[in-house]
């Protein structure tokens, strides 16, 4: 899937609001080291970096387009405590991060460094943590199969509006646990069970129409929407103590029809990108029309979408 990072940056005000709400929940002191998973265009990671002037923020994302855009928008010269790296949320590994950082070489760029932040060398040391693998389920150990120990580094693993794109949340949890120090926090907000139902209701009948159905054959599930029961089961398996896991209804509000359509164009890529470019806009307009027929703009012209967020707050034991 190819993201248009500039288009996303210009049409992600709702995601930015949600991310700011999540950042507020962190109650940052200012010296934390933060990993932002699924960082996208990097503007949220940059906000995190600003909130930790004596710490650092590193953004990882599977999309080369997003990481290229983030690096260009926030160059290391101007943002010394901020860094970006292409990495899949299912393959988070401190070994990979540090190897790339110290070698200064990455598949996508040669300028990646783990941001060092403002902590001096005598400040809290990297801690070595030993795998607390569950002998009954070794493959679910926080550090993954075959890894005996690893240096934990981050105080916070943060992720906003990204994990519903990830099919294997347990792999994400394993990686997050491996890079978090003991006592470090996992704070996540993503699409949860029941998210954007009304959009699916507009989308599905449109996809079945003769002119579009050929583009949607053999389509795999593009989003992975979980609920608290899933995470309450998984978190302890990967060495986390759950503080809070809940589904929260939230409205996304778009200033008008065009903004709704822009959001659909920029983030519903698994659907829109199946439609050839020459008729894609027509498809987007058709889905927008269907949605607005049932959910017309309010008196102020605003279009609302009922979203459901899965919010997770846990601590690495
Ligand atoms: C809607 S954007 C959110 C970006 C940013 N966190 C924000 O709040 O604006 C979702 C991001 O998740 C990333 N993503 C999807 N699957 C991923 C994966 N398996 N690993 C890492 N990033 C992934 C996408 O590339 C995209 O940049």
Image (spheres, rainbow, N blue to C red):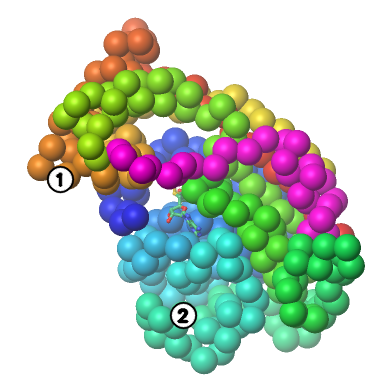
Look at the image and say whether residue 263 sits in the magenta stretch. Answer: no
The residue that mark 1 highlights is 277
| Residue 56 spot, x, y in % from top left | 60, 68
Contact between marks 2 and 1 (CB within 8 A): the answer is: no
Q: Secondary structure at mark 2?
A: loop
Foreground of the two, 56 or 95: 95
| Residue 26 spot, x, y in % from top left | 69, 49
Residue 39 numbered tag: none
Residue at the far bottom in the pictured view: 103
Say whether residue 125 is left or right of residue 254: right
Foreground of the two, 294 or 263: 294
Foreground of the two, 204 or 121: 204
Q: Is residue 3 above or below residue 259?
A: below
At label 1, counting other C-alpha atoms closer than 10 Å, the crowd grade (few under 14, some 14-19, many 20 or more) is few
| Residue 212 spot, x, y in % from top left | 21, 32
Of tags 2 and 1, the one toward the viewer is 1
The span picked out in magenta is 216-242
Quarter occupied by the N terminus: bottom left
Residue at image position (64%, 47%) is: 188
**How far is disc 2 from disc 1 in space, using C-alphas?**
34 Å
Look at the image and say whether residue 228 sits in the magenta stretch. Answer: yes
The residue that mark 2 highlights is 112
Say whether residue 197 is left or right of residue 254: right
Q: Secondary structure at mark 1?
A: helix
């Amino acid at each position: 899937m190819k993201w248009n990072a500039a288009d996303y940056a210009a049409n992600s005000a709702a995601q930015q609001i949600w991310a700011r709400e999540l950042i507020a929940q962190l109650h940052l002191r200012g010296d934390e080291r933060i990993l932002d998973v699924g960082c996208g265009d990097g503007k949220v990671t940059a906000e995190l970096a600003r909130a930790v002037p004596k710490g650092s923020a590193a953004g990882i994302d599977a999309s080369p387009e997003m990481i290229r855009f983030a690096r260009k928008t926030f160059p290391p010269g101007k943002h010394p405590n901020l860094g970006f790296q292409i990495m899949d949320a299912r393959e988070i590994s401190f070994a990979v991060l540090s190897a790339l950082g110290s070698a200064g070489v990455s598949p996508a760029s040669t300028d990646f460094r783990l941001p060092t932040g403002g902590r001096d060398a005598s400040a809290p040391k990297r801690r070595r943590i030993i795998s607390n693998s569950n002998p009954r389920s070794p493959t679910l150990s926080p550090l993954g199969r075959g890894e005996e120990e690893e240096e934990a580094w981050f105080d916070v693993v943060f992720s906003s509006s990204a994990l519903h794109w990830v099919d294997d949340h347990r792999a994400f949890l394993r990686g997050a646990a491996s890079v978090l120090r003991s006592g470090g926090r996992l704070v996540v907000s993503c699409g949860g069970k029941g998210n954007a139902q009304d959009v699916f209701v507009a989308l599905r009948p449109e996809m079945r129409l003769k002119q579009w159905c050929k583009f949607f054959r053999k389509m795999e599930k593009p989003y992975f929407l979980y609920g608290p029961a899933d995470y309450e089961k998984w978190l302890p398996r990967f060495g986390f103590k759950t503080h809070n896991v809940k589904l929260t209804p939230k409205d996304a509000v778009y200033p008008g029809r065009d903004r709704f359509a822009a959001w659909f164009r920029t983030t519903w890529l698994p659907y829109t990108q199946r439609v050839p470019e020459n008729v894609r806009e027509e498809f987007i307009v058709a889905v927008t029309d269907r949605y607005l027929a049932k959910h017309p703009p309010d008196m102020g012209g605003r279009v609302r979408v009922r979203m459901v967020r899965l919010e997770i707050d846990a601590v690495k034991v």
